[in-house]
Image: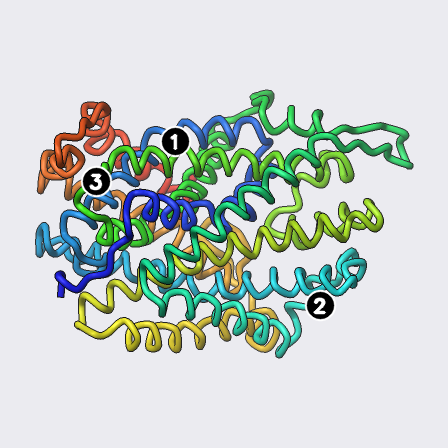
Amino acid sequence: MSKERNTFSGSLGFVLAAAGSAVGLGNIWRFPYLAARDGGGVFLLLYMLLAFTFGFTLLITEVAIGRRSHRGPLTAYRFFNRKWSFIGILSFFVPALIYPYYCAIGGWLLKYLVQYATLQGNATVDDAFFGSFISEVGSPIAYMIVFSAICFYVVLRGVEKGIEQFSRVVMPMLVLLVIFICIYSLFIEHTDPLTGETRTGMQGAAIFFIPDFEGMTLTRFLKIMMDACSQLFFSLSVAMGIMVAYGSYMKRSVNLGKAVDQIEIFDTLIAIFAGLMIIPAVYVFMGTEGMGAGPGLIFVALPKIFHSLGAFGHIIGIAFFLLALFAATTSAVSILEACVASVIDAFRWSRRKSVIVIQSVALVAAVVVCLGYNLLYFEYELPNGAKAQILDIFDYVSNNLLMPIISICTCLLFGWVVKPRLLVGEMRLNGYSFVRKRLYVILLRYVVPIILGILLLGAFGLY
């Protein structure tokens, strides 16, 4: 089985595919609204500190696990220690929970792209448009099916011909669109007709970059840190099984440490660009009040901004939602692949059978997520006090509970049971240097599990 395993063509193929997973919906949709809600600068500062410390630790660990074991996440941990195989089981359930609601969100993005492409973007300005759309029974499901069909086709084609080729085409387009919208957002200005105040994109950028600790409490700081940490899981695609799966497709000749550094830098830059793309525009047209729009930021707040730009707003709207759709697709493809890789290794199924079975089950779950806003609507109070529907519950269980638990257990396994030298040896394969070895070991054994343990307490509403 291992002899027939798919591989990326080389270092560039791996980096583009892994970056495509990392630079996905989490960066374009989730990062800006969290940064806006958490005051911009403080969130960005914490995110960057975490990204280059425990983000680097978790990312390089998971890729090394995959390449060393040559297995998908479900069976990779068993390769190192059978008693810790439960980590692989948890790592399978995370993408299995995330993929259905990513398909639902991908369907929403497709709907908005169609609205702007058919010159009907003005309809999205109405505050009730988004709620009315997701409350429908048939339309969200139809768009979700189209989006998931694209992901199905890419993953069915395999690693090199499907995922790698798709990433080679989409990633450059995604980067160009991000830079274009980012530059535009920085140089816009608007005078509020009610107050007469003129706000500029540069002022919005200052809010994003400059931390404001005035009135900051320890509880508030920890909550922002928890948001930054949870965003890191999505941004770097760690604790989802994705990087283990992609690592298992990496050739032994590739410099693992260098490849991971490239992913980390690329992801962080795109996250910053995404913030610069959205936060200044929201500030210019909606002031600081618009910064608290939350998850509905790109579906409710941004259409108002596009509308205020007149005819040019349609062009920007098409560009933005095309960008967001690209990002959602690269994320969803990698998440589906993590599930498929696990099933192929665990049950010795063919890729075709694995993709069809996983996709069929996920479609049913995605339909349930879509119906969670109409026929199956209910509100459930999460341990952190938030009101949740089905999508929110899927997100909370996977992101706030399972991901930190997986990462803590991974640190314990490779920091104390298996010992770090095994993975350090994987970094140094073919004589490559591993400059941050000492920092890596300290973070793996002590810092990362302690920080994640504290943040996990917050997920249970203990602070």
Find residue 50 and name its label. 1
User: Which of the two labelled residues, at mark 1 and mark 3, occupies the earlier sequence position?
Assistant: 1
- Write the residue at 50% across / 75% down: 367
Find residue 411 and name its label. 3
User: Which of the two labelled residues, at mark 3 and mark 2, occupies the earlier sequence position?
Assistant: 2
User: Which of the two labelled residues, at mark 2 and mark 1, occupies the earlier sequence position?
Assistant: 1
Q: Amino acid at mark 1?
A: Leu
Q: Position of residue 243 (x, y in %)?
A: 30, 49
Image height of 168 relative to 99, above or below:
above
The quadrant of the rendering that contains the C terminus is top left
Give 24 or 204, whichever is nearer the viewer. 24
Q: Amino acid at mark 2?
A: Ser
The quadrant of the rendering that contains the N terminus is bottom left
Label 3 neighbour load within 10 Å: few <14, some 14-19, many 20+: many
Count of all numbered marks drawn on residues in the image = 3
Residue 122: name its quadrant: bottom right
Judging from the image, what secondary structure is the residue with disc 2 in?
A: helix
Q: Position of residue 393 (x, y in %)?
A: 46, 60
Specify whether residue 5 is in view: yes
Image height of 458 relative to 339, above or below:
above
* Residue picked out by circle 2: 132
What whole-number distance in Å separates the C-alpha atoms at marks 1 and 3?
16 Å
Specify whether residue 420 is in view: no
Q: Position of residue 139 (x, y in %)?
A: 64, 75
What whole-number distance in Å separates the C-alpha atoms at marks 3 and 2?
45 Å
